[in-house]
Image (spheres, rainbow, N blue to C red):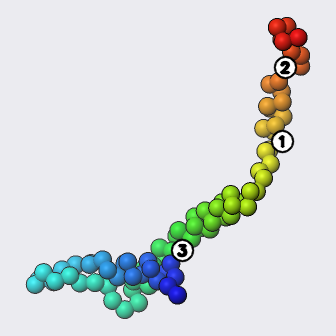
């Protein structure tokens, strides 16, 4: 099974890094594409994890609880009595 690391390494390995004097493309070889892919993946992994967690919340219909200060401030804006034209 191809992993995200494999796909990134494959994409990096397809990018020419220079050309020879004859005009032929030169590509990274050996373990370098995998090492670069691992470095890239380590940088984006926290964001991927956050997005996966958020998707799981949305799919699971997770209920979000509002912070108490938000609720208290909203309640404070409600008048104690109705205006005369609504009485």
Q: Is residue 81 left or right of residue 73?
A: right
From the image, tell me which residue sits under label 1: 68
Picture disc at residue 34: none
Q: Are marks 3 and 2 in contact (CB under 8 Å)?
A: no
- The quadrant in which residue 87 appears is top right
Q: Is residue 34 left or right of residue 49?
A: left
Residue pushed farthest left?
22
Disc 2 vs disc 1: which is toward the camera? Answer: 2
- The quadrant in which residue 15 appears is bottom left
**Rendered residue at 82%/24% (across/down):** 78
Picture disc at residue 42: 3
Mark 3 vs mark 2, CA separation in Å: 52 Å
Mark 1 vs mark 3, CA separation in Å: 36 Å
Residue 50 visible in the current orientation: no
From the image, tell me which residue sits under label 2: 79
- The quadrant in which residue 17 appears is bottom left
Mark 2 element type: loop
Above-or-below relation of 1 to 47:
below
């Amino acid at each position: 099974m191809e992993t995200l690391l494999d796909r990134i390494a494959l994409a990096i390995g397809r990018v020419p890094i220079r050309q020879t004097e004859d005009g032929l493309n030169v590509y990274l070889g050996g373990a370098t594409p995998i090492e670069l892919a691992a470095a890239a993946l380590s940088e984006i992994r926290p964001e991927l994890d956050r997005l996966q967690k958020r998707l799981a919340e949305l799919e699971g219909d997770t209920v979000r609880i509002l912070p108490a200060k938000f609720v208290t401030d909203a309640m404070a804006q409600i008048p104690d009595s109705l205006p005369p034209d609504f009485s």
